[in-house]
Amino acid sequence: MIKPRKKKTESQKLRDECDDLMREIIRKVSGNICRRCGKYHERIEWAHFIPRKYLKVRWERDNCAPLCGGCHQYLDNFSMEKDEFFYGLIGTARAFELNRIARSTSYKVDKEQIKHDLEEKLKLLEA
Ligand SMILES: [Zn+2]
């Protein structure tokens, strides 16, 4: 029997909206060029350095890279190569800072604010 899908909470809906905005930003900024192999791909993925479950850095630009499916899978399977790739993009100091922010317990993520900021960024890109 197929289980009925659980209804999403408002917070989950907001998270999904932020994800959609961020994906759109990543595609626009990258021009569908994979940051690792440098090739054009019809489908470009929104890859993370620190995993998405760490909400405080989920939508941080420096925590993301546009990757093709193959490069994304490769880096997710080889964590040392993934670290090296992101250190090359953002530098080790920023990488360690993101790590610290990701694990911070001193504040809560304001998804409404994040959504607003992402909408503004997207507007600028579309202007
Ligand atoms: Zn690639």
Image: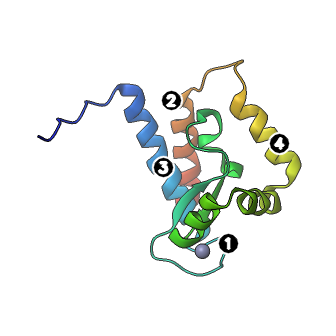
Q: Nearer the viewer, residue 17 or 103?
A: 103
Look at label 4 and name its amino acid. Answer: Phe
* Residue that appears at 53% across and 50% down: 22
* Residue that appears at 40% across and 32% down: 12
Q: Which residue is mark 3?
A: 21
Q: Nearer the viewer, residue 105 or 73?
A: 73
Q: Which residue is mark 4?
A: 96
- Packing grade of label 2 (10 A; few <14, some 14-19, many >=20) is some
Left of 105 or right of it: where is 77?
A: left
How far apart are labels 4 and 2 at the CA level? Answer: 26 Å
- Packing grade of label 3 (10 A; few <14, some 14-19, many >=20) is some
Ligand 1 closer than 8 Å to label 4 CB: no
- Packing grade of label 4 (10 A; few <14, some 14-19, many >=20) is few
Q: Is residue 40 above or below residue 71?
A: below
Ligand 1 closer than 8 Å to label 1 CB: yes
Give the mark nearer the N terminus: 3 vs 2: 3
Left of 116 or right of it: where is 106?
A: right
Q: Which residue is mark 2?
A: 112
Q: Secondary structure at mark 2?
A: helix
